[in-house]
Image (cartoon, grey):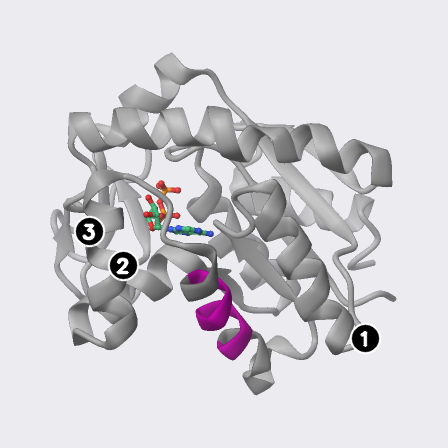
Amino acid sequence: MEKPNIILLGAPGSGKGTRAVVLSEVLGVPQIATGDLFRKNLKLMTEIGKVAKGYIDRGELVPDEVTAAMLRQRLEEPDAQNGFILDGFPRSVNQAKILDGLLAQKGAKINSVIYIKVDDEEIVKRLSGRMICSKCQAPYHKIDNKPKREGVCDKCGGELVVRDDDNPDTIRKRLKVFHETTFPLVELYPKSGILSEIKSEKSANGLKFDMAELSRRLGFIK
Ligand code: ADP
Ligand code: ZN
């Protein structure tokens, strides 16, 4: 069976991160989220964090050189050698090219792109209830994905917080960037025959069931 080298595409608030976490459990490969990597760098006040801060606060994309260097390092880690789920990269046609180049150096390539489709109205609703764990970055939602204990992460006991960039102005800007810069990727990948589209609705079966079924359909598990 092929190693799962997967891209998850979707607007901010599409449920991309939540699905990436579950897919990562199902497939036993890491979720690599550039937004999470940036937030770690911000917390540790690294050089990357300092450069990225202004862009993130404004809801703009961090320059490609910075993002690609950070991603390249992450892809070198041992746990990423048997596959990965990219969450939040690429976000533009140029980043898709950069990614192809990075993987080609390792003799690898993307074999699946999963696009999570959801309307803008729904997105704004979702983002307004979103929280993340301040320690492990696990995503939660006040209504749709509540933690077992209010304000506390189920996985690590960390405190749940609202992200600084989940304010109305930045959300609006991020949606604009998604439509103008990221969405063209959804039109780019069908030509390669590796794009699957999924809906971002809650299903009766649950997320784990859905992600396992999708993984089987894509041929990554039996
Ligand atoms: P969301 O998908 O909810 O907008 P992310 O956590 O993926 O949030 O990203 C947060 C911010 O981090 C983005 O608004 C952007 O500033 C920066 N960022 C994340 N991924 C990338 C990327 N691939 N290229 C440039 N900037 C990025
Ligand atoms: Zn946590």
Q: Total marks drawn?
A: 3
At 62% from the left and 42% from the top, the residue drawn is 93
| Residue 2: x %, y % from top left | 84, 65
Secondary element at image label 3: helix
| Residue 26: x %, y % from top left | 61, 59
Residue neighbourhood size for the residue with mark 1, other residues' Cα within 10 Å, grouped as few (<14), some (14–19), many (≥20): few
Q: Are marks 2 and 3 in contact (CB under 8 Å)?
A: yes
Q: Is residue 133 above or below residue 210?
A: below
Can residue 148 be seen at all in this image of the molecule? no
Question: How far apart, in angstroms, are the residues tagged by discs 2 and 1?
Answer: 30 Å
Residue 69 covered by magenta stretch = yes
Q: Which residue type does callout 3 highlight?
A: Gly
Secondary element at image label 1: loop
Q: Is 128 positioned to the left or the right of 184 in the image?
A: left
- Which badge, 1 or 3, comes first in the chain's sequence? 3
Residue tagged 2: 52
Residue neighbourhood size for the residue with mark 3, other residues' Cα within 10 Å, grouped as few (<14), some (14–19), many (≥20): few
Along the viewing direction, whichever of 157 and 148 lies nearer the viewer: 157
Q: Which residues are magenta?
A: 67-73
